[in-house]
Amino acid sequence: MNVVVCFKSVYDDVAIRTNSDKTLDYQAVPHIVSLYDLNAIEAAAQFVEGSNGEHSLIALTVGDTKIHDTTMRKNVAARGASEVYLVMDDALEDAETHQTAQAVAAAIKHIGNIDLIICGDGSADIYAHQMGIQLGEILGIPNVNAVIDFTAEGDTIKVTRELDEEIEHIEMQAPAVLSVLSDMAQPRTCKVADIMSAGRKPVHELTLEDIGLELPPANYAVVETKVPEPTPRKMVFFEATDEGIDEFIEQVHTYLTTEGA
């Protein structure tokens, strides 16, 4: 099977600063691979590595030209991908989910002959849970989310997914899209040899024109992003005595009764 694992380049939230007007300052903030996509990459790599050479793994991302990051692509290649595809176009800056899914789908068609597409459960920045679902719809192939395990026998893909109160087992024919939960596979610690060899793996840089896509208009626009005002603390103190504990319990009960949990 030819497998594509999708990953997203996101701002490193640890480095984001807040301006005085509560807006976010992204200047000098590096891009990293979305943490949930690292789990997806590991799940895909384990699937391919356990196939005795029957499967191959391609890593794919789309975004604006900020994703042109050598460290990030080597990080992905060191985790088991044999090739990395980057669709870079400034038209993809601040692209919403549907636009991103259209670009990913067009890139997959451009690559061609793909049997299995693996996505993370959501992205670390928006976490909309939409990419796998929309990819399946655009490509006209089955898609399953909340995946905790999958295997393949020929063209048959066997999937285990975790629902709220039950475990579901599904069989489908390739090609298909799977969105895996982060618990499925923990990202590996890359060895020095993997990092060194990653620099020699093919990296394909494409534009929207290369993949034959005219980006559709956005369904919505983000008007403003601000840090919420901190919730003021009541600063109520209780004595560490039996009476103080009783008073604490009474006030908590009163609050939950009047304000709700």
Image (cartoon, rainbow, N blue to C red):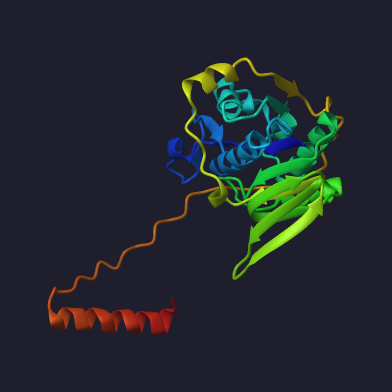
The N terminus: image quadrant:
top right
The C terminus: image quadrant:
bottom left
Q: Position of residue 122 (x, y in %)?
A: 62, 49
Up-down relation of residue 86 to residue 1 (above or below): above
Taking depth in this image into account, of 82 and 105 the one nearest to the observer is: 82
Q: Is 74 left, or right, of 114 in this rendering?
A: left
Give the total number of marks visible in the rendering: 0
Q: Position of residue 66 (x, y in %)?
A: 62, 27
Q: Which residue sits furthest front?
A: 52
Q: Position of residue 189 (x, y in %)?
A: 47, 32
Q: Quadrant of residue 259?
A: bottom left
Point 59% across, 20% down: residue: 198
Point 62% across, 15% down: residue: 200
Taking depth in this image into account, of 86 and 5 the one nearest to the observer is: 5
Up-down relation of residue 182 to residue 82 (above or below): below
Q: Quadrant of residue 240?
A: bottom left
Q: Is residue 220 visible?
A: no
Taking depth in this image into account, of 74 and 165 the one nearest to the observer is: 165
Point 65% across, 48% down: residue: 222
